[in-house]
Image (cartoon, rainbow, N blue to C red):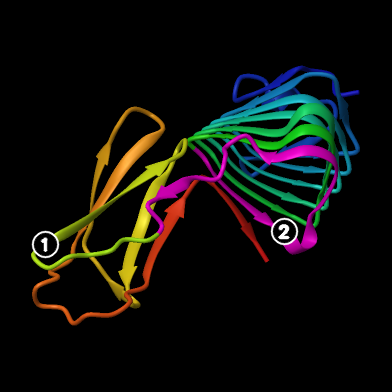
Amino acid sequence: MLDISKIDASNVNQLKLGTYSSGSVYLKNVATDSLTISGMKVYIDSSLLKAIKIVNSTAIISDSEISGLTSINSNITFTSDVFRDSYAGIISNSSFIYVSDSQFRNLTYAVVPNYSSIFIQNSSVSYFDVSNISSVAKPKLTPLTILVQKGVKALSLNIQGSQVNVQSVKLNGNDENFSIAQHGNNSLTLSFPFESQSLPDGIYQLQILLNVRVELSV
C-alpha cells in the first residue's frame, strides 16, 4: 500500500514506494485506497488504484486497475488499463484524456467529461456491463432537410446538446464561414451564408463537424 495519500512538490522526495527522478514520479506495483497527485509528471505501472485524483499534472498510466479516477486540468494517457466497479471510469474536468487497449467494466458511465477532450481508441477498447459510454448525450440537429426559396441569403439550424462546439461547416465539400448564437448551456443556433439567388437549383449536401468532448476513433 502506498505510504502517503497525496503526492506534490512538498513531499515528493519522501516517497518510500516509488521513485522521483529528473522531475518525474515513477510508481510501480503500488496499491492505493485514496491518492491525490498534484502538480507532477507521473508514470504509474501495474498498480491497483482506488479513488485517485490527478490535478494540474501530466500522467501516463499503464497495466493498472482503476476504480474511480478524477482528472482536473491534467493531461493523461491510459494504456492497457481496466476501469471498474465505480460510478464512472474517468471523471474529467478541463483535461485532455487518451485511452487505448483498455477495458471499462461494471460502470454507470465509462467517462464523464466536463469541458474536457477525451479520445478513446475504440477499436482497442472493450466495454462490459457499462450503462453509457459518456454522460454527454449525442447532440440533435434540426431541421435535417431545408427547402430553400429564392431570395434567401443565409440558413440557420438549431443544435441541442451539452458542451457542443462547432468545428467546421462544409457545403458540397467546401468550407463555409459560420456564426454561433448560444442559448443557455444546451442550445445554440448555427448560421451560414447561402445566396439562393445566385446558386443553381439542386440538392446541396451540408456537413457539420461537432466536438462534444468525447471522440471514439477506430
Please state which amino acid type lies under the numbered disc 1. Lys
Q: Say which of 187 and 133 sits in front.
A: 187
Q: Residues within 10 Å of mark 2 (few under 14, many from 20)?
A: some
> Can you identify the residue that label 1 sits on?
153
Q: Residue 32's spot in the image, x, y percent? A: 85, 24
Q: Residue 116's spot in the image, x, y percent? A: 51, 39
Which comes before the other along the chain, label 2 or label 1? 2
Marks 2 and 1 sit apart, C-alpha to C-alpha, by 41 Å
| Quarter of the view holding residue 129 | top right
> Can you identify the residue that label 2 sits on?
122
Helix, strand or loop under label 2: helix
Q: Residue 174's spot in the image, x, y percent? A: 29, 76
User: Is residue 146 visible in the rendered structure shown here?
Assistant: yes
Q: Horizontal placement of 30 versus 38: left or right?
A: right
User: Is residue 25 visible in the rendered structure shown here?
Assistant: no
Q: Horizontal placement of 101 versus 31: left or right?
A: left
Q: Residues within 10 Å of mark 1 (few under 14, many from 20)?
A: some
Q: Say which of 66 and 105 sits in front.
A: 105
Q: Horizontal placement of 211 versus 188: left or right?
A: right
Q: Is residue 122 magenta?
A: yes
Q: What's the magenta region?
A: 116-144
Residue at 53 percent across and 38 percent down: it is: 95
Picture quarter with the N terminus: top right
Q: Are marks 2 and 1 in contact (CB under 8 Å)?
A: no
Marks 2, 1: nearer the viewer: 1
